[in-house]
Image (cartoon, grey):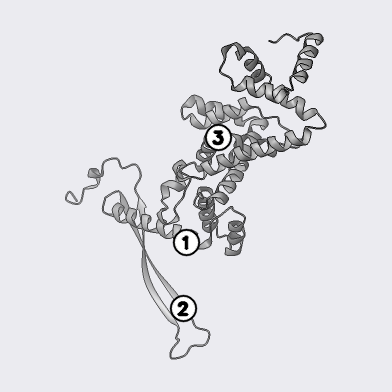
Amino acid sequence: MSAIPPASAVNTILQLMLANEVSLWDLAKTVLSTPRPNYQPIKDSLQQHAVDICCLLFSSVGCREIVFSWAFETVVEVLCEEIVDLSSECNGLHFKASKTTSTQLEDSFMRTLALKIKKVAPNVFKMLLALLDANPGRRRKFSVADITEMLREYEEDNDEGKARKRQRRAGERNAALMIIVREKTVICACIFAQNSNERCNTLQCIFGIFLHSSGVPQRVIDVLAHAGLSISTQSIMTAVKSLSKEASVQIKRAVRTLTTALAYDNFDIDFKTAQPTIEHQSQFISSTSATAIPLYGVDDPAVLRCSQEI
C-alpha cells in the first residue's frame, strides 16, 4: 500500500465514487469500522498516514481553521483530564496543614513533584516545557531523551547516578534544563492543579512555611497566596502549630534519654509602660530557659551511665 498508484487509477476510483454518491468520509468511516480482514491493508494505510492526512488538511486553506479548532479542543480536553487526575487525592499531593510534620519538609519535594507530574500528567509536562522554551532566539531544544535522562538521575541514588549528576551539572545546558524542569515546570503545574482542587497544595504549603520562617511580611504572603504560590496566613499558622506539637513530643522523648544535654540560661525582661498607671504598671520578669542539645556520636547510651562509678 506504500506505492503511489497511477493517476489513471485514482481518477477511476474518484469517478466511481461520484457515480455512486460515495464521499471520502463514507469510505474512510467504513474502512476503519469494518471488521472484514480483506480491508485491513487499507485500514493500516490510513492509520500509518494519519499524521500526513492531518497535516494535509491543516495546510489546506478551507480546512485550516476547522482542523486547528478540533485539534486545540482535543488537546485542551486531554490536558484538563491530566490536571484533574494530578489534583486528585490518590496521587498524594494533598497537604493537610493541621497534620504537618518535619519529615514532609525534609524530603526533596521538588524532585518528588517533578517525577509525579511526569508520570501522571506527561502531556502537561511536555506542554509547559515547550512554552518555557518558546523563544527561537534562546531555544535550548530540549529533547525527550534529555528529559528522560534528567528524571532518571532523580530516581538514581547510587554512586554512579550521583557521579553522572555531577558531570551533567557541570554543563551550562544541563544546568538550565534542571532549573526549568524542576522549578518552573513544577510551579506552573502545581498552580494549575491547586486551582482545580484547592486541597492539592503541597508546593503552596511548603512554600508558605518557608516564607513564614524567613520573616516575610503578611502582606507579601497574602499576595502570593492569591497568585496560587502559597497558602493563606491562617493555614500557615495551623501548620506551625502542628510542627510545634511534634517538636514538643520529640523534645520530651529526647530528654528522657541520656543522649540529650540541657543548657540553662537565666534572663530578665523589663516590660516598660510609656505612661504607668495603677492598672497598667511596668513589669520586670526573671525567667530561666532550657535548651536541649542532642549528643551526636553516642551509639550506645549505656556508656553514659557513669553516675554510680563517680
Residue identifier under label 1: 237
Q: Residue furthest left?
A: 308
Of marks 2 and 1, the one in the foreground: 1
Residue bearing the label numbered 2:
271
Say which mark, if any, is on residue 16.
none
Q: In this view, does 212 lie above or below 84?
A: below
Residues tagged 3 and 2 counted as in contact (Cβ below 8 A): no
Task: Kindly identify the amino acid type of the residue bearing the numbered disc 1.
Answer: Met
Residue 162 image offset from top left, x and y in percent: 51, 29
Residue 246 appears left or right of 201: left
> Can residue 50 be seen from the camera position used here?
no
Please tell me which residue lies in front, 309 or 299. 299
Q: Which residue is drawn at 50% across and 39% down?
A: 112
Along the polypeptide, which appears first: circle 3 or circle 2? 3
Residue at the (36%, 53%) spot, across then down: 293
- Name the foreground residue: 8 vs 16: 16
Q: Which residue lies furthest to the front in this view?
A: 20
79 or 9, nearer to the observer = 9
Q: Marks 2 and 1: CB-CB under 8 Å?
A: no
